[in-house]
Image: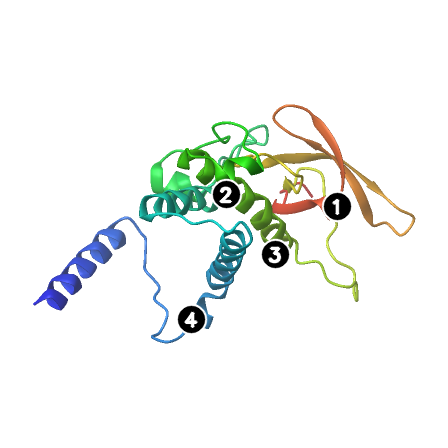
């Protein structure tokens, strides 16, 4: 009976999705390799979270662990996916939180936390410190996955003016620096080495190794 109710609910949701031109695509059973993108993300999160809990020797109760998981979830769902509009002057980006919460979510952590907070009596400060540690370690593993740089065996696309990029700098929790390339500087081999990026607050000069391409420019 329970399985029939679940199947009925799934079919109903699928029909509603089809009415607004959204079609579900399911992976076959035991075919986890079909979802390589999110499976790789899950493995990265699991490894970082395990390392944080092990190295910090954190001992949390059920409520503390659940709060930490919520903070980790907020970090993952706040990552930028693509541009939010077609306006080239709009530097806002679409995140999973926009799809889940209809808003970008948190922007900055609620304070500054240090290593001594890991042993504080206030469990809230302990959780926030562990969340900061997770952010620092996870971004160092996540950003290289987006860059995917390999040894040059053939000529590849250069960064171009108008590209929407993510700057891989050390930032506070929930702070993703995105911007559009204003100017590119090439070497004698006609390869872009560094660029000037317009962000919401200023213009930054960064090497291409510190950039993640989110969306290519339509400018020819």
Please, what secondary structure does the residue beneath circle 3 have? helix
* Dot 3 crowding, Cα within 10 Å, few <14, some 14–19, many 20+: some
Identified at 54% across, 32% down, the residue is 113
Task: State the image coordinates of residue 215 (x, y, percent, origin top left).
Answer: 59, 45
Q: Are marks 2 and 3 in contact (CB under 8 Å)?
A: no
* Dot 1 crowding, Cα within 10 Å, few <14, some 14–19, many 20+: many
Please, what secondary structure does the residue beneath circle 2 have? helix
Task: State the image coordinates of residue 31 (x, y, percent, origin top left).
Answer: 40, 74
Task: State the residue in front, 67 or 173.
Answer: 67
Instruction: Give the residue at mark 1.
Output: 208
* Dot 2 crowding, Cα within 10 Å, few <14, some 14–19, many 20+: many
Residue at mark 4 to residue at mark 3: CA–CA distance:
19 Å
Instruction: Give the residue at mark 2.
Output: 130
Residue at mark 2 to residue at mark 3: CA–CA distance:
23 Å
Q: Are marks 4 and 3 in contact (CB under 8 Å)?
A: no
Q: Residue furthest right?
A: 188
Instruction: Give the residue at mark 3.
Output: 145
Residue at mark 1 to residue at mark 2: CA–CA distance:
31 Å
Residue at mark 2 to residue at mark 4: CA–CA distance:
30 Å
């Amino acid at each position: 009976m329970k399985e029939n109710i679940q199947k009925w609910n799934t079919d109903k949701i699928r029909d509603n999705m089809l009415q607004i031109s959204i079609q579900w695509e399911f992976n076959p059973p035991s075919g986890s390799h079909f979802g390589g993108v999110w499976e790789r993300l899950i493995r990265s999160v699991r490894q970082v979270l395990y390392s944080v809990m092990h190295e910090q020797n954190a001992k949390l109760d059920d409520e503390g662990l659940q709060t930490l998981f919520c903070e980790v979830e907020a970090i993952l769902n706040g990552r930028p996916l693509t541009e939010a509009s077609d306006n080239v002057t709009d530097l806002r980006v679409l995140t999973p939180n926009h799809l889940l919460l209809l808003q970008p979510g948190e922007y900055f952590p609620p304070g500054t936390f240090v290593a001594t907070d890991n042993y504080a009596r206030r469990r809230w400060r302990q959780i926030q410190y562990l969340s900061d540690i997770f952010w620092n370690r996870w971004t160092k593993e996540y950003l290289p996955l987006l860059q995917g740089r390999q040894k040059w065996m053939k000529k590849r696309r250069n960064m171009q003016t108008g590209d929407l990029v993510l700057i891989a700098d050390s930032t506070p929790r929930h702070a993703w620096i995105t911007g559009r390339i204003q100017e590119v500087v090439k070497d004698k081999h006609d390869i872009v080495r560094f660029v000037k990026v317009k962000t919401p607050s200023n213009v930054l000069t960064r090497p291409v190794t510190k950039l993640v391409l989110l969306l290519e420019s339509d400018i020819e």
